[in-house]
Image (cartoon, coloured by chain):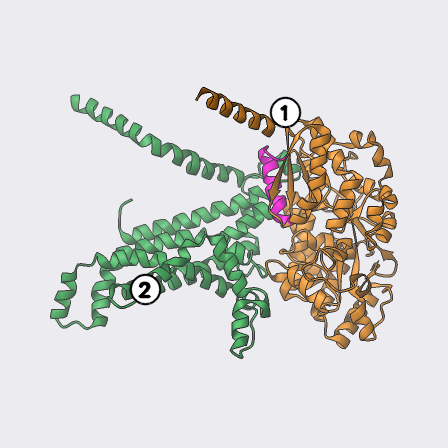
């Protein structure tokens, strides 16, 4: 009998020891199944290389809800040790809130960082000059159009040179095919996407291409902002953009996953991930031969010029209040590994930030992404500042009013300016 | 003298006896409410400089709130939502169900169970279930049924958003209304009906002169409970529409959530919550005064 008891106790002890093989546990927040799948090998590497247990905490999948939960936990002081930030527009504000640990020195001392493209490094620097995030992948965005639909209707697939040409092309698509000609994400339901995937595409090519002045104020009363809203209004008034789905609870589902694959929407802003995640091999509604069926245009400038929008794709950051800060920073470096960049590119379709991937056969197999990665350094981006997430929210509100045809361009601009003034104070706006 | 000491000891004992109940109320209800009032006078935020260094703003959030058209819109939507779903929809259908269930007809238990069933589904689950019924234009279940019948499909949540939200909340709350009103109906003495019948009262007169007046306390109690609980409905509306399209279904609870956890302005959201609390309190006091009961 005693032998049974001793044996049982020994088994329990062994299982407990096996369960806590490492002294420390690192809590890592992830969201979305594709992201969780992509990160699994990195989590295993962190455990093996750093001798810690990794606890993956699955958060709500939509970006907005993930960010809400993350910020709530960070504000309460019980956030995860390591987490990704879904919208780069939120980084500066999280820095200002004191949530992120500075990692500039760690990245500078990390040899692989030398291979990262300059645009990624610049995007990672916060307004205070310090780096707080690992810029391991980039979102390279352009306008994606149904080449097959346009060619079948005899519509030019050449790069539009100006906003006027882009608008004319959208009108021609509508007239000849009946499909919606162009989509820029808009409205409050789309959350940060109304700014990151919509408004940003136009403002970078406007007469006032930056929203932040040298003294850190927001230049929102500019002619460029007014002209961007006018472009939205022209699209909406001419029924060139599908408005009703944008006012629903999941505004991306119908236009991106149903209308575009069906050819009912002929052009939309999107990122490199669309070739894989939205309409490619990871899609539930793939477009056959997507690389040839779907082409890309750079964002035309208002009066000319071509712009490819670059931003950080869900950069990783370390909680300033992490239980073991040094350990969390070491884990952060693992998130920037070539393996994680390629795994993420494979699963989600973002562009690896390191030029070293070009020599890796696993990345060379991702034929859709190879040319985009090579050109990543030509990306244009918006200067960041504290309060950018408020501007992003203001843009969502302003474009929502445009979608509802409640205001003209000046009214939309007033909504944006008033929102930022009311939230950040009069002094925040130039 | 002896009586006074006894009385004081008795009061102290009562206080001790109440303490286990008072403490949770203080910690979980009173303290958060007072803290919300404090927050509403700051620019506290979930992110940005205000998250690290919140400033005291006084009544600035309230002034901003009262000049915010979206806030007034949310109050209007809330009134329509409460009147439409709780006061009209749930009450009328619940009352009809309660009266129907009192009659011993075949299938009454099944009918009762069917009415009660929606209460078993959590708010969010019910919301997602109705999304599949209503959202997606021609792809929604209801539209497919209409198309199968040769009728044109309807984009329900974009064409009639508030009506749809009212309808779904009505569907979900009929059971509660039915239970409360059934209890009220059972409390009306059978002798009164008997006397009315002997006096020659017709069914309409019996209902208007006996049932309704004697049910009045139950009806008011139901109105109080359902009004307060409907003002605070969040999960159902958020899951169904998130307040859209274009704020057309943004009830006050969703407005507060959007300000606090989508725009991350905790202080401003708290101001909205305090106003909602005052409105709810005023309605509650109004109902209680109408009932002429002492609380």
- Chain B on-screen colour: green
Q: Residue at x 85, y 71 (%)?
A: A156
Q: Is residue A264 left or right of residue A371?
A: left
Mark 1 Cα within 10 Å, few/some/many (few <14, many 20+)? few
Q: State which chain disc 2 sits on.
A: B
Q: Is residue A22 visible?
A: yes
Residue highlighted by disc 2: B97
| Figure check: A235 above or below B34 | below
Magenta stretch encompasses residue A68: yes
Q: Which mark is residue A23?
A: 1
Q: Residue at x 70, y 42 (%)?
A: A39
Q: Which residues are magenta?
A: A63-80
Q: Are marks 1 and 2 on the same chain?
A: no
Q: Quadrant location of residue B44?
A: top right
Mark 2 Cα within 10 Å, few/some/many (few <14, many 20+)? many
Q: CA distance from mark 1 to mark 2?
A: 62 Å
Magenta stretch encompasses residue A1: no
Q: Quadrant location of residue A22?
A: top right
| Residue B148 image point, x, y percent | 53, 76
| Residue B215 image point, x, y percent | 25, 59
- Seen from the viewer's position, the closer of residues A230 and B24 is B24
């Amino acid at each position: 009998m005693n032998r049974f008891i001793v044996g049982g106790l020994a088994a329990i002890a062994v299982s407990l020891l096996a369960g806590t093989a490492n002294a420390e546990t690192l809590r890592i927040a992830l969201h979305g199944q594709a992201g969780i799948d992509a990160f699994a090998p990195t989590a295993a590497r962190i455990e093996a290389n750093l001798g810690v247990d990794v606890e993956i905490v699955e958060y709500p999948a939509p970006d907005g809800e993930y960010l809400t939960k993350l910020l709530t936990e960070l504000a309460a002081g019980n956030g995860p040790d390591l987490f990704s930030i879904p919208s780069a527009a939120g980084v500066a504000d999280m820095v200002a809130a004191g949530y992120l640990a500075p990692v500039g020195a760690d990245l500078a001392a990390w040899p692989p960082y030398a291979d990262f493209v300059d645009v990624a490094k610049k995007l990672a620097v916060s307004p205070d000059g310090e780096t707080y995030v690992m810029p391991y992948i980039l979102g390279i965005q352009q306008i994606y159009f149904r080449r097959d639909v346009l060619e079948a209707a005899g519509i030019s697939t050449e790069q539009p040179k100006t906003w006027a040409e882009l608008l004319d092309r959208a009108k021609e698509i509508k007239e000849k095919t009946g499909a919606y000609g162009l989509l820029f994400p808009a409205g409050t339901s789309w959350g940060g996407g109304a700014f990151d995937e919509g408004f940003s595409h136009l403002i970078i090519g406007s007469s006032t291409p930056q929203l932040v002045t040298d003294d850190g104020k927001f230049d929102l009363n500019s002619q460029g902002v007014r002209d961007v809203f006018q472009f939205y209004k022209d699209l909406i008034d001419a029924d060139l953009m599908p408005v009703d789905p944008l006012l629903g609870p999941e505004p991306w589902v119908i236009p991106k996953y149903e209308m575009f694959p069906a050819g009912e929407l002929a052009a939309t802003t999107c990122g490199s991930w669309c070739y894989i995640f939205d309409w490619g091999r990871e899609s539930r509604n793939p477009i056959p031969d997507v690389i040839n069926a779907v082409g890309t245009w750079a964002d035309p400038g208002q009066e000319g010029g071509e712009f490819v929008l670059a931003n950080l794709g869900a950069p990783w950051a370390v909680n300033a209040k992490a239980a073991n800060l040094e350990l969390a920073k070491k884990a952060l470096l693992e998130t920037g590994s070539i393996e994680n960049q390629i795994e993420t590119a494979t699963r989600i379709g973002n562009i690896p930030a390191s030029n070293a991937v070009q020599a890796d056969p696993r990345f060379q197999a991702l034929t859709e992404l190879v040319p985009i990665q090579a050109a990543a350094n030509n990306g244009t981006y918006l200067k960041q500042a504290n309060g950018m997430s408020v501007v992003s929210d203001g843009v969502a509100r302003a474009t929502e009013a445009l979608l509802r045809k409640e205001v003209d361009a000046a009214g939309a601009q007033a909504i944006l300016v008033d929102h930022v003034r009311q939230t950040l104070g009069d002094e925040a706006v130039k | 003298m002896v009586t006074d000491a006894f009385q004081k000891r008795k009061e102290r004992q009562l206080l001790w006896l109440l303490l286990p109940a008072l403490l949770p109320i203080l910690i979980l209800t009173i303290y958060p409410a007072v803290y919300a009032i404090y927050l509403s006078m700051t620019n506290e935020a979930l992110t940005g400089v205000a998250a690290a260094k919140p400033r005291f703003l006084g009544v600035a959030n309230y002034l901003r709130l009262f000049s915010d058209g979206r806030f007034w819109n949310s109050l209007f939507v809330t009134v329509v939502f409460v009147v439409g779903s709780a006061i009209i929809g749930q009450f009328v259908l619940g009352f009809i169900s309660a009266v129907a269930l009192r009659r011993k007809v075949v299938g009454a238990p099944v009918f009762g169970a069917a009415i009660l069933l929606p209460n078993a589904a959590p708010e969010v689950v019910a919301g997602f279930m109705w999304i599949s019924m209503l959202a997606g234009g021609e792809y929604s279940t209801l539209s497919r049924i209409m198309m199968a019948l040769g009728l044109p499909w309807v984009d329900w949540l974009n064409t009639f958003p508030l009506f749809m939200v009212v309808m779904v909340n009505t569907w979900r709350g009929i059971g509660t209304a039915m239970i409360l009103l059934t209890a009220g109906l059972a409390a009306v003495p059978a002798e009164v009906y008997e006397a009315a019948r002997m006096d020659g009262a017709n069914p309409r007169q019996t209902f208007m002169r006996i049932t309704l007046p004697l049910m009045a306390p139950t009806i008011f109690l139901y109105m109080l409970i359902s009004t307060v609980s409907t003002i605070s409905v969040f999960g159902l509306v958020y899951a169904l529409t998130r307040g859209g399209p274009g704020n057309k279904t943004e009830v006050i609870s969703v407005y507060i959530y959007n300000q606090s956890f989508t725009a991350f302005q905790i202080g401003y959201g708290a101001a909205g919550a305090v106003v909602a609390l005052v409105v709810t309190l005023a309605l509650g006091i109004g109902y209680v005064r109408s009932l002429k009961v002492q609380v």
